[in-house]
Image (tube, rainbow, N blue to C red):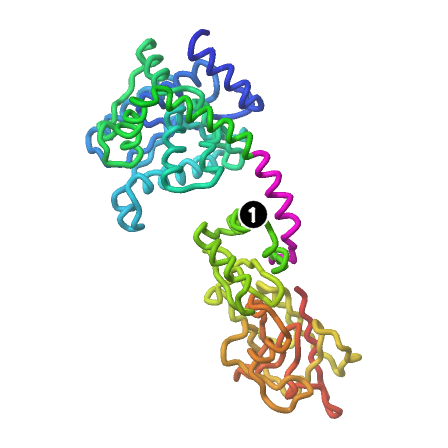
Amino acid sequence: MNGLLQDFAAQWKKQFPQWVPDNCVLLAAVSGGVDSMVLLYLLHQLQFRVEVAHVNFGLRGVASDADEALVRSTAEALGYAFHRQQFDTAGYAADHKIAIQEAARVLRYDWFRSLQQAATDPLPRLLVTAHHADDNVETVLMNLFRGTGLQGLTGMDAYRSAEQHIRPLLPFSKKILQAFADTHQIPFREDASNATDDYTRNYFRNTLLPMVQEVYPNASNNVLHTMYRLRESEQLYREAVQKHISGLLEQHEAEWRIPVLKWKKARPLVTLSYELLHPFGFSPGQVFEAIKLLDGDTGSYIQSDSHRLVKNRNWMLICPLQSQAGKQHILIPSADSEQVFESGKLLVSPLQEPGTITDALDEVWVDADHISFPLLLRPYATGDYFYPLGLNKKKKLSRFLIDLKLSRPQKEQVWVLTTADHKIIWVLGQRIDHRFRIRPGTQTALRLHYRK
């Protein structure tokens, strides 16, 4: 081996020592362009088990079909399994109101993941893509101009273990790959759209970077060297951030809590607030809203697609969103039932007489003589009211929960057991209705036991 092949083998051994030909299958994403065709050649020379995945995006008519034909014939010649998929990329982009390039990225990676997951071979299937050094430079510069944090300036990872995704060509420039293809007469297809500035990346590649290199001839190498230095800086940054955040966050089941005063004293406030919220889906723009929320009223909140940040007196709560629309309404058919639901388990047992009545909130007895089945188990709703035990007058359930000082997320977890005509029998884990209390003349009791 010599030249690129030798360097590629050395880089693989250095960066991915855990992956050798005997213990994995490589799913090579091959478009037919020079980068991915060179990658396929290099993997073949290292004698890995390879399967080829090709996406026909249907954007260039017969040219797209010719790309597919080249990749298919090459895979067959090398004895590799060939997977192909065609998408209506333009239609997907229009339906989801995103750019063509973003649509293509989403579609191809979703499909690649499905191929990885569908494998019946016991060996892990690793996705291998042909991103190279020039791609990394373009990515860093695009992130810089869009606005980014430290991580956005460190470029693409060579290996993402969670996705089992490898980018082994990142140390090598496009120029080196092109020269290797020419020397070894590796066939490839030119994508005519790469020569246009129709897409942002193409503008950086074809226009902006060449202009910069007229003034700074080593600009690309300088960006790469800076990127590598920033990677080391990021390691120190991550350690410091983790130390600060671990002193702020307190986990309680599915909920995270942060003392308001501690958060307000954290420094640097904006940076730590971003790192605190980002894992829960909050955007950089919401960081400033969150900081304002520290001085907000109890019950005020902001939310991401997956979580809600709520002010609750001296605490900030981060809770997963609960869809009320998706919650069940469950019929309890008889007096001897066990019902599992999303907030726990409810056991209903008939008794000839009640046991010793205690102050326990999760186990109660009610008068079965005043109850007819079926019963209904459901989340509490706006407008609900009941007669709390010991108070022979009705009270809005929302006010009752406020008096208990429950936070908004805790209120969203409240369920009620009602009669068929919607009278609340029990606010689970809190209070029974006075109308269904055990009386001196009660003949039959129901034992209700709620387990979270």
Element type at mark 1: loop
> In this view, which residue lies farthest toward the top?
2
Circle 1 sits on which residue? Answer: 268
Q: Position of residue 157 (x, y in %)?
A: 48, 31
Does 45 sit above or below residue 246? above
Camera sees residue 76: no
Residue 403 at x, y = what percent? 62, 78
Give the vertical position of 32 relative to 362 (above or below). above
Residue numbers of the magenta segment: 235-255
The one of 219 and 155 positioned closer to us in this rendering: 219
Q: Quadrant of the C terminus?
A: bottom right
Q: Is residue 300 magenta?
A: no
Question: Which quarter of the figure has residue 314?
Answer: bottom right
Is 425 on the left-hand or right-hand side of 134?
right
Q: Quadrant of residue 415?
A: bottom right
Q: Position of residue 11 (x, y in %)?
A: 50, 18
Q: Nearer the viewer, residue 177 or 66?
A: 177
Q: Residue at x 62, y 84 (%)?
A: 371
Q: Nearer the viewer, residue 100 or 290?
A: 290
- Residue displayed at 57% across by 70% down: 411
Which amino acid is tagged 1?
Pro
Give residue 188's position: percent from left, percent from top: 29, 20
